[in-house]
Amino acid sequence: MLVHDERHSKGAIAPPIYQTSLFSFDSYQSMVDRFRGDTDQSVYSRVGNPTVSVLLDKIRRLEQGEAAAAFSSGMAAISNAILSLVKSGDRIVCVKDVYPDAYRLLRGLCARFGIIAEFVDGSDLAAIEATLPGATLLYLESPNSWLMQEQDLVAIAKLARANGVTTIVDNSWASPIFQKPLQSGIDLVVHSASKYISGHSDTVAGLLVGSRSLIETMNAEVTPYLGAKLSAQEAALLLRGLRTLPLRMQRHQESGLMIAERLSQHARVKRVFHPGLARKDYSLLRGYGGLFSIELAGGVDIPAFCDALSVFRLGVSWGGYESLVMPAEVSINQAGEHNSAVDFGVSPRMIRLFVGLENPEDLWTDLSQALAGA
């Protein structure tokens, strides 16, 4: 689906940035009309801003949903969505190996409020089906973190609907360019917009897309009180990123697949976790990003490998220009009570790679020399 820029005020090519905390009214009656819900005039930027509204319309159309919401981080999007759907005593089913902070939210904060989280192998449809009766929410991430496993979203959505369970999918890995989960029957799609949608590693943001009823309920009952609003400046940066998203995703796909295929043949790499190397029949992916994992063979010194890299940088997150590595051993040993990598058996010999927009041959040369010297 093509989503083009609308024409903006005074001939502006880029959407104007409404850098204001509040909006005034022309008359007493116009204020009455707005507070009564008869108009949609902006009131206060914590709950609505015209620059943010342009962004929401674009992401809604890209994901082919009815409504969207924007937040100050991906975790804010996740927490707002979850807290609008569950209450004390409810049970959430979640696939294993999700984003670590989403895992900690479910295992930690939700547990404090009497919300139970149960984790299941996302590739095992029978196991998912067995956990759904009595659940309120099913949280998915396709592909998931570290192991990059896809879930059969069409089949899972049907099972969830049959059991009255609401579904959320983190679609950050694929972006709306390469996957549209709402079209398979999923209820809500969440994005860490800090990743591909931003594309420049200069903003932190989250987006949520779904049905109008789910978004409106969240906006009425949860979002205004958690206060995790997206600023006009950050919305403008995301709008800038959306303009080049299809082109960047194509480059990430081409470079990522090239690197993954070469690493799969390398003697010092035990295994490559990339959905493009073992495509599933049920896959909804129309393409692949630049994020995948490798497991290094025994004998490879992981710290030496990481320190030998010169083009790839050590860092969390992904989705920008720069290529990055994240060692699983560092993630496993980080401070914190709950760690999904530990609980679900992610090998400490795994490295998460993000293939950025640099020359792919330069990236391959960098990885090759680091592997040879480690």
Image (spheres, rainbow, N blue to C red):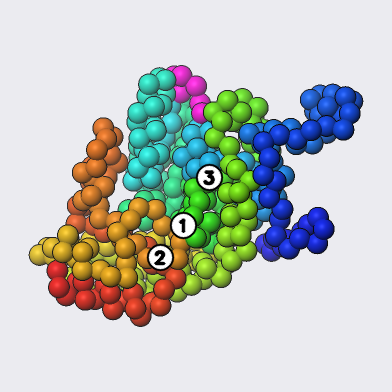
The first of marks 3 and 1 along the sequence is 1
Q: Earlier in the sequence, mark 1 or mark 2?
A: 1
Q: Quadrant of the C terminus?
A: bottom left
Q: Residues within 10 Å of mark 1 (few under 14, many from 20)?
A: some
Relative depth, front residue between 119 and 246: 246
Q: Nearer the viewer, mark 2 or mark 3?
A: 2
Left or right of 7 on screen, residue 127: left
User: Taking 35 as reference, is 328 above or below it?
Assistant: below
Q: Quadrant of residue 311?
A: bottom left
Q: Quadrant of residue 338?
A: top left
Residue 201: assigned label: 1
Q: Secondary structure at mark 3?
A: strand
State left or right for residue 323 relative to residue 196: left
Where is residue 71 shown, x and y percent of the image?
Answer: 56, 40
Task: Choose the circle earlier in sequence order: 2 or 3.
Answer: 3
Q: Which residues are magenta?
A: 83-90
Instruction: Please tell me whether the stretch drawn in magenta is mainly helix, strand or loop.
Output: loop
What residue is drawn where x is 60% and y is 43%? 231
Disc 1, SS: loop
For badge 2, the amino acid type reads: Glu
Tell me, yes or no, whether the two marked residues, 2 and 3, touch with CB atoms within 8 Å: no
For mark 2, what is the residue?
Answer: 322
Q: Nearer the viewer, residue 295 or 155?
A: 295
Spatial CA distance of label 3 from label 1 is 14 Å
Can you tell which quarter of the image residue 355 is in?
bottom left
Q: Check disc 1 and give the amino acid type.
A: Ser
Graded by Cα atoms within 10 Å as few (under 14), some (14 to 19) or many (20 or more), the crowding at tag 2 reads some
Q: Point out which mark residue 206 bears.
A: 3
Q: Three-letter amino acid code at disc 3? A: Gly
Check disc 3: other Cα within 10 Å, few if <14, some if 14-19, many if 20+: many
Quarter of the image with the N terminus is bottom right
